Image (spheres, rainbow, N blue to C red):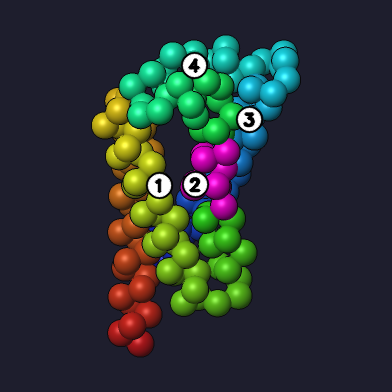
Amino acid sequence: MQKLCRGYSLFMNWFNGICAPVCGIWMMLSALVALPLSWNDWMPISIYDPFPLHDVFFTSHFWPGLALFLVNGVPNIVALVLSGKDKSKWHRSCLVAGIFLLCWTITEMLIIPNGLSLFYLVLGILQTLAAIAMIRSEEQT
């Protein structure tokens, strides 16, 4: 079971450590410059209308892109760096990354429910549970 938890945690660190920064930067660039394939082509700005202060922070994809980068990308990148150095810190950083992903997706699902958020919610639950299992295993040894 521990091997499965470690493998899944590494997968999530790589997956979100790559996807969140790429999508976040793509969103921010779409707000700043004209791109051949813009985030605006995928998701209209009006999707943010249900969010509080949408007329302040959600007038473009810049702030949501930065939030995606910082909230989901950075914690997984940090966890990935720690995975080869300090197992205890890695386990805890995986837990933080999982909790951040849960907070992100729960907030998004409450405000703008969609299938992709449900998919990431499941990934976040599994990431958090895997981290808890690794921490418990570490404490028992």
**Which image quadrant: the C terminus?**
bottom left
Image height check: is 74 above or below 109? Answer: below
Q: Residues within 10 Å of mark 2 (few under 14, many from 20)?
A: many
The residue drawn where x is 49% and y is 47% is 71
Are dots 1 and 2 in contact, CB under 8 Å?
yes
Residue found 56% across the figure and 68% down from its top? 83
Secondary structure category for the residue under label 3: helix
Is residue 71 shown in magenta?
yes
In the displayed structure, does residue 9 sit left or right of residue 74? left
Q: Position of residue 9 (x, y in %)?
A: 45, 58
The span from disc 4 to disc 3 (Cα, nearest Å) is 13 Å
Picture quadrant where residue 122 is located: top left
Amino acid bearing label 3: Met
Report the predominant secondary structure element of the magenta stretch: helix
The residue indicated by pointer 1 is 101
* Secondary structure of the residue carrying numbered label 1: helix
Say which mark, if any, is on residue 62. Answer: none
Q: Residue furthest bottom?
A: 141
Three-letter amino acid code at the position of disc 2 = Asn
Residue located at (36% from left, 73% from top): 135
The three-letter amino acid code for the residue at tag 1 is Leu
**CB-based contact (under 8 Å), mark 1 and mark 3:** no
Residue at mark 3: 28
Indicate left or right for 19 with 52 as reference. Answer: right
Q: Amino acid at mark 4?
A: Ile
Q: Which residue is mark 2?
A: 72
Seen in the picture, residue 87 relative to 69 is either above or below; the reply is: below
Upstream in the sequence, badge 1 or badge 2? 2
Residue 113 appears left or right of 81: left
Question: Disc 1 and disc 4: Cα gap in Å?
Answer: 22 Å
Is residue 114 in sight in this rendering? no
Q: Position of residue 14 (x, y in %)?
A: 56, 50
